[in-house]
Amino acid sequence: MNFFILSLIKAAAVAAVLMTTLAYLQWIERKVIAHIQLRVGPRRVGPHGLLQPLADVIKLLTKEDMLPSHVNKVFYFLAPFVAVTFALIAIAVIPFGPEINIGPVHTAMQLTDINIGVLFILGLSGMGVYGVALAGWASNNKYSLIGGLRSSAQMISYELPMAMAIAAPLLMLNTLSFRELVNGQAGYYLGFIPRWVVFQGPFPQILSFLLFLIAAFAETNRIPFDLPEAENELVAGFHTEYSSMKFAAFFMAEYANMITVSCVGTLLFLGGWQPLFPAEYGSNFLPSLIFVIGGLTCLYHGFHPARPFDRITLPIAGVVFLGIAAAFAAPVIGPILVPLFWFASKVGIILFLYIWVRGTLPRFRYDQLMRFAWTFLFPVAVANLLITGLLVALTA
Amino acid sequence: MDAILFLLFAAIAVICAVNLVVQTHPISSALSLVGVMGALAALYLLLGGEFIAAAQLIVYAGAIMVLFIFVIMLLNAGAEHKALKKSWVKFAGIPLLVALLGLVSFLVQTLIPQTVGVNFGGFTHGTALDVGRALFTAYLLPFEVTSVLILIAILGAIVLARKEID
């Protein structure tokens, strides 16, 4: 029963963090894209628009829930449910940090460690197609149908290169469990180059990582592969007929998929929570250092304010940052938080890359998308897997 | 716990399978089949065949059924019209079905020799490692022959589907 209670607590914590990240990822995306396009982005609700996600949630919850008269009701309601369910389940097998001891309790920073974790994620991403395909079909609308069809064809096509790219690190580390994958990437070459898969030979695995990233962008229907919801040709694609919370469910599913894919990329290629440089060079103090610098900068500008408002907000932010820095250096919770910092920063970098690409690249045409998948990405992924497998077999 | 989960997923599989036949719209039927596949994956997992369960989910429930649904959507197949039933079919159908199922299960029980029963957790060779080893040692020839067979099927599909260009 102890196991049961512990699992409930962990599930509640993970769900809370995931939902907050989902909401704020969208805020960060709007902010980053605004700055790329020389705008300021949301800043009316709360300081720097920080309460914007909350306002959006209230807006989506209270909006009128339209039910178009021509839809297939059962599947119309089922589709957003399917999409969001399979997107959120995936987080259950993602480990966020090493095994820890809190008092007498020994537990892993993960909901469940199954020894087919990678396959589980692949299976769920395959099931996620149904949400989009059904939404497109059940809406009974030509734009939605084209969006749904594009999405299912695209996701099937890009799942193959993605699975092939994932298989290369699996061959090298010889396991399917995420926790063992990360443990296999511990340590350093020559004392300072981390043994993350992306830095490993004999065949440079950065190629696998790039293949994985490209396929992941397509799997999550993000720019430059967001053909299923291309505004200028399909209105809004598969979710044209959805409003209110049903629309929000698709939105949540897209962002949850982004987070899951970024986590998988981090765990498979970037060494999970393993730090960038060894502890003897002070990797455990880096998070504290970053937050101390941030806090001191805020305090300095708070006492030399450029705008009268800064006199109040910046010292508060500075004190919060210094508090976080102290938490990272604290004796008991510090060792728990530092791996989380490394994990979150790597996931954050991949998520930022998503947003960066969205702000800079145009969209593919549909025939280009398919030709790229089948005539370039897939053969390269197969060749990469073959060479890696051969070299692993020769060196083993 | 195992027995409860088994009954739950077995019930889901059977209900979905019945629904597959009862539904008139092809999309409903295809989705019921997805339900059957998913429930089967859960049953494999309960029996200890974790790799088979994952493969079932990825290959059947994921890839193949998505292609089914894709084709149904592309062809825009509508709901089937039920053929007019004769009155004796309505009354005799279900009893005859029950009789047939009873006969089949009786024959299976008597003709197939009793072997060791399956129990939960008794099978421990379901990991990816064991499956891979079995495929590449004991079952290497069937595995390769099946690959060639699938390749031939793909080539045949391409030949059949290719339009003749004048």
Image (cartoon, coloured by chain):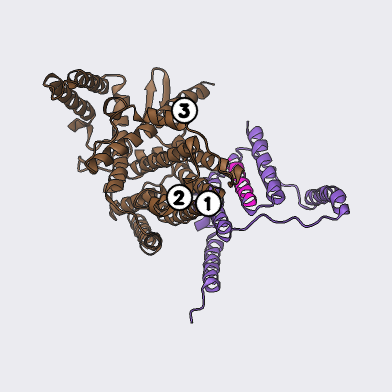
Chain colours: A brown, B purple
Residue A256, quarter of the rendered image: top left
Which element is circle 3 on?
helix
State how far apart marks 3 and 2 are (Cα): 33 Å
* Distance between mark 3 and mark 1 Cα atoms: 38 Å
Q: Residues within 10 Å of mark 2 (few under 14, many from 20)?
A: many
Chain name for mark 3 = A
Q: Are marks 1 and 2 on the same chain?
A: yes
First along the sequence among labels 3 and 1: 3
What amino acid is found at the position of numbered circle 1 in the picture? Asn
Instruction: Give the labeled residue for mark 1.
Output: A141
- Residue shown at 27%/19% (left/top)? A331
Amino acid found under the numbered disc labelled 2: Gly
**Residue carrying label 3:** A11
Q: Earlier in the sequence, mark 1 or mark 2?
A: 1
Q: Is residue A201 left or right of residue A168?
A: left
Q: Which residue is mark 2?
A: A237
The amino acid on which the numbered mark 3 sits, given as a three-letter code, is Ala
Pick out the residue farthest to the left: A304
Residue A306 in sight in this render:
yes
Q: In the image, which is nearer the foreground, mark 3 or mark 1?
A: 1
Give coordinates of residue A100: x percent, y percent.
Answer: 37, 26
Q: Is residue A178 magenta?
A: no
Q: Horizontally, is A377 left or right of B74 in the view?
A: left
Question: Range of the magenta residues?
Answer: B28-45
Q: Classify residue A159 as left or right of residue A211.
A: right
| Percent coordinates x, y for residue A354 in the rendering | 32, 44
